[in-house]
Amino acid sequence: MSDATLQNVPSGKSIRGKLSRDDIIMRGSMIVIGLYLLITMAFPLYAMLSKSFSTYKFDLAAYEVQVSDETGTNFSQPVTFADLNETLNVVAETDLSAGSDGRLGVTQFFPDFSFRSPVNYRLRNTSDTGRFLVGSTLNDATDWVELDSNTFRRVQLRPVEARGLDNFRTYFRTPALSNSIKNSVIIATVSTVITVFLAFWFAFALNRSCMRFKGFFRLVAMAPILVPSLLPGIALVYLFGNQGMLKELLFGATIYGPIGIIIGSVFFTFPHAFLIISTALSISDARLYEASVVLRGSPWRTFWTVTIPGARYGLVSAAFVVFNLVITDFGLPKVIGGQFNVLAVDIYKQVIGQQNFEMGAVVSVVLILPAIVAFTIDRLVQSKQVALLSARSVPYSPSPNARLDWTLFGFSSLVAVFIVGILAVCQFAALVKFWPYDLSFSLNNYQFDRMDGGGWGSYYNSIKLALLTAVIGTSVIFFGAYLVEKSNGFRTGRTLFQMFAMLPMAIPGMVLGLSYIFFFNNPSNPFYFIYGTMAILVVSTVTHFYTVSHLTATTALQQMDREFESVSASLKQPTLKLFSRVTVPVSMPAILDISIYLFVNAMTTVSAVVFLYSPKTSLASIAVLNMDDAGDIAPAAAMGMMIFYTNAAARILHLIASRGILQRTQAWRKR
Amino acid sequence: MKTNVESSYLKIENLWKFFGKFLALENISLEVKEGEFICFLGPSGCGKTTLLRAIAGLDLQSSGTTLQGGKDVSNLPPSERDFGIVFQSYALFPNLSIEKNIAYGLENTGRSKDEIKARVAELLELVGLPEQGKKYPAQLSGGQQQRIALARAIATNPGLLLLDEPLSALDAKVRVHLRHEIKELQRKLGVTTVMVTHDQEEALAMADRIVVMNHGVIEQVGTPTEIYREPSSLFVADFIGEMNQITATAGAGNKVRFGSAVMESAPHQFNEGDKIIAAIRPNDIIPHGDSAHSLGKDDRVETESNAIDVEVGEMEFLGSFWRCRLRHELFGNEDLIADFSINAVRRLELSEGSTMLIELPPTRLMAFAGSE
């Protein structure tokens, strides 16, 4: 405030508005949903971050021990284990680092130890941070404990927790781990370049040419969204694996590794890139093309000066989305990565394989960084995209050009063959008896109950999860978006909420899942009870896919007249009446879009839930992973295709339902 | 007319509004009488909509009090105040039929279904759209939609009707027609009304009193004729209608000086030698003929000192009159703009390049403080 206005500041006290009942209800609800986001995202992430800085170390100087002579009396002078280790050197310095569950036996400090000897031992903690186990009894007092030899061998030291960067130091000093950063970045970069290239020309063909069968191509392009990311991995194993049909095409190279990951990544990220670029290409302004023709620009020059600049935000955005998807994907490299380590799989290996939760947390932190950078740049680019289309733009409609149209048709057909081929191979493999020796058909591979992975139960669990996620997620997310968009005042609260709502997109699923372990799998957490239930799967899935849904809802709400709430208040009607009678019906298309998005993703997701399912709540996508892991690749392919058909059916149902609901609730749209 | 009732229905005292550090309303005080039609007029960004929203409670003022019907409503939320509102965008609920839109505010008020139905029919009749109840808003024209919005706003008989640029989104012709209808309706209902507009013509045509605002302060409050004939500042003078502005100095006692010439002017408070802006409206400039070109028997110069010979520059034909740019060395490089009737132009045989005698009548020649 300038001095001039300061002098003029009004004498009366400033007004504090009285809150209406609606204001209170809306703020209250916003705080509830805000708390939900806090508990399901911010707190777990914090728990994970703090875990990555936790180190556990055996502090040998924290214990004193006395040894008796053969009579069991006459104890020696107290010495610490550190003193003993100095002379004996039985435990190397690096071995003193341990996980939270680390245990260190003590008999190794006594070369003459025999559990039959009559020698007695006395042991105590020198400070109250010291802890040791006798059998399974924890001793953390500083009093002397006297033990006979036979009991003494059951003594185990427990590590002391400290905070520091040691885990990160270890991580970067271990090439086996830190190489994954390079691997992940290479994989993601190469996949991004290829996918964006293919998706651009595919979108170009659909938007800017007069080729035939556009509807079919559009449908095919979206198919990969309906399957888990690991499904193309299975198809590639069948095609190029050790017993693959087309193995020779690789000229001795192996599909298990970067090649497989890249081909599979192109498959599952293609629809995402295609959608974004297609949108960018569809909104270009015909007047620019006319201008270019009038100025005698060659088609090539027009392409570089009009088409590409018009689509550049779409291209950049697509590139970052694909990069983010590939670098955070877990299912595909798990199936086909072989010995080629990437970050997302490292998290899994550290946590599930080695039970090294601290290192899992460290890898997670490393994985978050590129994801957040990609996410931030994408958001910045998207915010610039808005101004491109003005109300006066004239939509571009392509004119026939036989050579271009047929070239693009050929190209699009190749892409379509690739996509359909991958799915067909999976379906074929699922139906044959024993690849590649007995190619006769059977339904044996659908007897999931005879395989590892949870059987048909996991399939029904998936459907349950998908339905619950769609219903609960859509309600929570849409209502949350409504509160943010339409409540009065409370600006800090709304900004904070908006930030929380954007965060999940930057958090890779693996990281979210792992952080849930740290946060919820803790008996002192009041929400501990949801651990291992369907509830935690629903919660994690809703949170994982919160951002895109939130943005869809926000966009729909922003298109609504800002004054509805004002009018409603002036007519003294409760805001919730407006919400149910006007806002929800008018936003029905967006609400349906959100629910199908959540349904499909809940069916296919692997990354977050892989840490959170319990034997009772195994899921179809997890079953694919586990059956593949166990070598039951054909059943894995069969289950993967079940997910595909379910999602396809859901999409068709969604289409029919949308039509029906739209006809009833959107009659007003027609003039 | 009800406007003569000497009770103030709406009373605003020392209202301030800050948006962060930006001062949007500065110490606004205003009284609106019961049944009066008030227009807030000003350029965009002058704070008129902010003031309206503060009155409605949609965006509370930073400080100051609002009394409505003698009751302090300063800090009440909109739902606890008594007003109906119409927006530029109509804000009709698109998925509800016209009937349901109008009935929206009547529900949950203890009225029976039949009462509501009767009231809706009555309102549709009132706004002249009795047959349209079953349609949806998108099926009506803009003007029709705005009438429905009006019907919805007055359905519950609010004590105060707020109109936020209600006609801005409409075609010029519909606008003129509807502004007449709104004014009629307001007169019939006798509801105290505050309308925000940036269209001076609209304000002049509809308002009982106009509140001219600029940069968050009230420049002038008055009836349309007061505002037009006696603008209290150069801003008002320029914003309402058109105004020639000529740099000048004040002379002793109701005189203005252009270079060597001294003319009589409307009374002013300036001291001799003060830098001022002399102002006169284009249609206040009187054309005079010589013996050859007389405009009639009343054609004679009233104040000799205010008559000068000018050269006619560009002439624009604007349908009902001619707009002429007049040049004289007294006015420096600036042209004096005058609107002459077609009749006068013909009789005086004016054409570009000819000379003529004009008179600046003293009562219409105003003096305002020069800009610093």
Image (spheres, coloured by chain):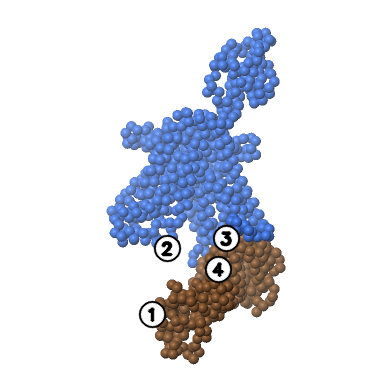
Q: Which residue sits at x=60%, y=38%?
A: A520
Residue drawn at point x = 68 percent, y = 71 percent:
B8
Query: Which residue in the structure is indicated by mark 1?
Result: B353
Q: Mark 3: which amino acid?
A: Val
Query: Mark 1 belongs to which subunit?
Result: B
Q: Which mark is residue B42?
A: 4
Q: Residue furthest bottom?
A: B297
Q: Are marks 2 and 4 in contact (CB under 8 Å)?
A: no
**Residue A582, numbered circle:** 3
Instruction: Measure the C-alpha gap from mark 1 to mark 4.
Output: 38 Å
Tell me if residue B135 comes above or below residue A617 in the rendering.
below
Chain of the residue on which disc 3 is drawn:
A
Q: Earlier in the sequence, mark 1 or mark 4?
A: 4
Q: Is residue A430 left or right of residue A24?
A: left
- Which residue type does callout 4 highlight? Gly
Q: Residue at x 40, y 34 (%)?
A: A257
The answer for which chain carries disc 2 is A
Give the foreground label among 2 and 3. 2
Crowdedness near tag 1: few (<14), some (14–19) or many (≥20) residues, C-alpha within 10 Å: some
- The span from disc 3 to disc 4 (Cα, nearest Å) is 34 Å
Q: Chain of mark 4?
A: B
Kindly report which numbered mark, 3 or 4, lies closer to the viewer in this rendering. 4
Rendered hue of chain B is: brown
Q: Earlier in the sequence, mark 2 or mark 3?
A: 2
Q: Nearer the viewer, mark 2 or mark 4?
A: 4
Q: Is residue A264 visible?
A: no
Q: Give residue A110's position: percent from left, percent from top.
A: 59, 14
Q: Colour of chain A?
A: blue
Q: Are marks 3 and 4 on the same chain?
A: no
Element at label 2? loop
Query: Residue at label 2?
Result: A392
